[in-house]
Image (spheres, grey):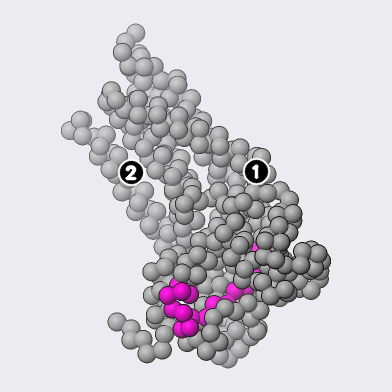
Amino acid sequence: MKRYFPFILIAAVAMLTVGSGAMLYRAKQRSVAAAAAAAAGATAGATGTGASAMTPEHVRGASGAPVTLEEFGDFQCPACATTAGVIQALEKVYGKRLRMIFWQFPLPAHQHGRDAALATEAASLQGRFWEMHDLLYQNQATWSAEPDIRPLFESYAQELHLNVQQFKKDFESEQVAARVDRQREHGVSRGVQNTPTVFINNQLVTPPFTPERLQEAIDAAMPGHKSS
Amino acid sequence: MRDSLARARVVFNAIAAVVALAGLADATYLAVAHLAGDNSVCGPSQPCSIVLGSAYAQIAGIPTAAFGAVAYFSAFSAATLAAFGYPRARSFLIVIVAAMFAFTLWLLYLQAFVLHAFCPFCLLSAAFTFCLAGLTLATPPAR
């Protein structure tokens, strides 16, 4: 018996770790979802329809698409970068049936999150929001580690053939700051606390945002979908 | 003399197993919070959020803490087997702890010189790894 005891102990610790990890995961998911759902419900009650009260600034895809996916994101959040890749792949799969809306939600905890949001809004004024959005997510690891990101963001603006002088001016403008603030406040009003937060046809989707999970949620939101 | 050395080996390995368990709990908590998308782990601490929200908080889409959890579990298994006198377990423990030590130094470097912010959970994990390294070095080798 003594010979097997260490192996029994190791197996018990493995099971205990996996079990308590799974329980903790469920509890954390519930608390994240409950907080957002409660506030989203409050917003739905306030607007009467549950629809977003603010006109989105950043929309990609067909305006008549039956499904709208909204993401509240922070460009320095690693999970947002992963989710952005997943959403981009899904946009290709669904084509005209899926419309994507991005809302700025820079978290104060991220050193460059707000500056990244300002950079995308400055690019947006020159009609290049989505290009800057994609570029920042693709290069997140590079610029996140930089102490001074402005020269890097200006080089991205150059890469996207923007008017860099105008970009620099807009980056520091109150207009661009207000755009970020408005979108963030909109997120707060809908109960957003963390990033990424995803809504599909105004219904909150709980993480993790794996391709399978998002695809399932999109399919469920498609008109004519029969729930099994 | 031999008896006291053997007893010391058992005690040191047993303590190492307990320390590895504590590290496992810390790393598992962080990995689960990351996977669940819970950004509130740090509370109001901004430096902590900078570290856990940084690009280094995951490697190839897998939370860095999950690698830590696997390493701590391996260290726990090796220390437990070593405490029960399995001869090869000590060599395995040394390799695991050396890798953890090197990885911890890299993470501390990132916090100090790249992110300019520290997270208490990460510092706690670093302390556990340094304890493990000290215990592994201090354990008398089997003859």
Question: Magenta stretch containing residue A104, yes or no?
Answer: yes
Amino acid residing under circle 2: Val
Quarter of the image for the C terminus of chain B: give it: top left
Q: Position of residue A162 (x, y in %)?
A: 72, 67
Residue toward you, A61 or A225:
A61
Q: Residue at x 34, y 8 (%)?
A: B1
Vertical order, A155 against A126 (above or below):
above
* Highlighted magenta segment, given as a residue range: A90-109
Chain ID of residue with mark 1:
B
Q: Left of B49 or right of it: where is B9? A: left
Q: Is residue B104 left or right of residue B84?
A: right
Q: Secondary structure at mark 1?
A: helix
Residue sitting at x 55%, y 90%: A49
Residue B4 shows up from this direction:
yes
Evaluate if marks 2 and 1 touch, with contact meaning CB atoms under 8 Å apart. no
Write down the chain letter for disc 2. A
Graded by Cα atoms within 10 Å as few (under 14), some (14 to 19) or many (20 or more), the crowding at tag 2 reads some
| Residue at image coords 31%, 27% | B89
Kind of residue at disc 1? Val
Name the residue at 44% across, 48% down: B66
Question: According to the image, label 1 marks what residue?
Answer: B114
- Which residue sits furthest left? A1
Tag 2 residue: A13
Q: Give the quarter of the image for residue A155.
A: bottom right
- Residue at the far front in the pictured view: A161
Position in image of residue B59 (x %, y %): 49, 49
- On screen, residue B131 versus residue B21, left or right, reads right
Quarter where residue A153 is shown: bottom right
* Total numbered badges shown on the rendered structure: 2
Residue B29 visible in the displayed image: no
Front of the two marks 2 and 1: 1
Residue A191 screen position, x and y as percent: 59, 74
